[in-house]
Image (tube, rainbow, N blue to C red):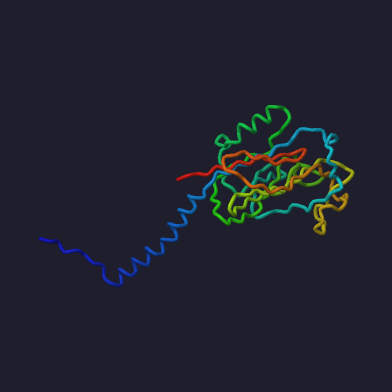
Amino acid sequence: MRTPGYTLPGKALITFTAALLAMVPLFASAQESRDNLYRAEIVIIERLVDPQNVEERMASRMPEPVGNMAKQMKVIRADGSVGTSLRLAPETDLRLRSAAQRLENSGRYRVLMTAGWYQSFPPNYDGEPMQIAVGDWLADAGHREVEGHITIDRQRYLHVGVHLNHWTAGSSSAYPVQGDTGGNELQPASTTARAELLTWIRETRRMRSEEIHFLDSPTIGVLVFFRPVEG
């Protein structure tokens, strides 16, 4: 004896089918996120050298002031509190942790920032600049010793753009905290604030997964590492 089957009424069947079709983009989006998921790691270090021994003289250059950005990688405020837009992974999980420790243990470097997080970077990903403000607080200047931003993009390959300024306390020159730079980063500095530009990093580099990349200036460096997360 055959048990009669149950058939959805026509209207209910159409509604059910429409609901399934509506979920397809969600499943596709989730799959794409998994396929392009990476663990990103960035470490910023300072090379411990006397500013007088830095051959690159940049005190007369005036970078544009770094204002508050929508996204923050790591911003240490004047009161010591930390702001970030990322869900940072524990430092003990970072691949770059041992490399950063070796550099600091050498006595020639100081680690200013470590940041690791998980994020999907699909093809044609156009990342927003993520603000950075780390190092000593320069009270007269009203900002941290190292400030700027880092941007991560992906076309065919991942690219990291580093835009960082390294300042030191000084009295001979400075850059205006509220002033208009006119978009020219090579103008002589004014004396509105008391900070001298030691060096900067202005570099965009293609990243290879599972490789440690190092971008540097005479006084600061940035370690970058990406690892694809499968599954």
Query: 81 or 113: which is nearer to us?
Result: 113
The image shows residue 202 at horizontal and vertical percentages of 74, 48
Residue at position x 71%, y 33% in the image:
110
The image shows residue 229 at horizontal and vertical percentages of 50, 44
Query: 62 or 203: which is nearer to us?
Result: 203
Please identify the residue farthest to the bottom as the structure is shown: 11
Query: 155 or 27: which is nearer to us?
Result: 155
The quarter of the image holding the N terminus is: bottom left
* Picture quadrant where residue 5 is located: bottom left
Please identify the residue farthest to the right as the structure is shown: 172
State how many labels appear. Answer: 0
Lateral position of residue 16 relative to residue 98, left or right: left
Query: 181 or 127: which is nearer to us?
Result: 127
The image shows residue 25 at horizontal and vertical percentages of 44, 61
Residue at position x 61%, y 36% in the image:
96
Residue at position x 76%, y 46% in the image:
165
Position above or below: 205 against 1:
above
The quarter of the image holding the C terminus is: top left
* Picture quadrant where residue 194 is located: top right
Please identify the residue farthest to the left as the structure is shown: 1
The image shows residue 21 at horizontal and vertical percentages of 39, 64
Lateral position of residue 13 relative to residue 197, left or right: left
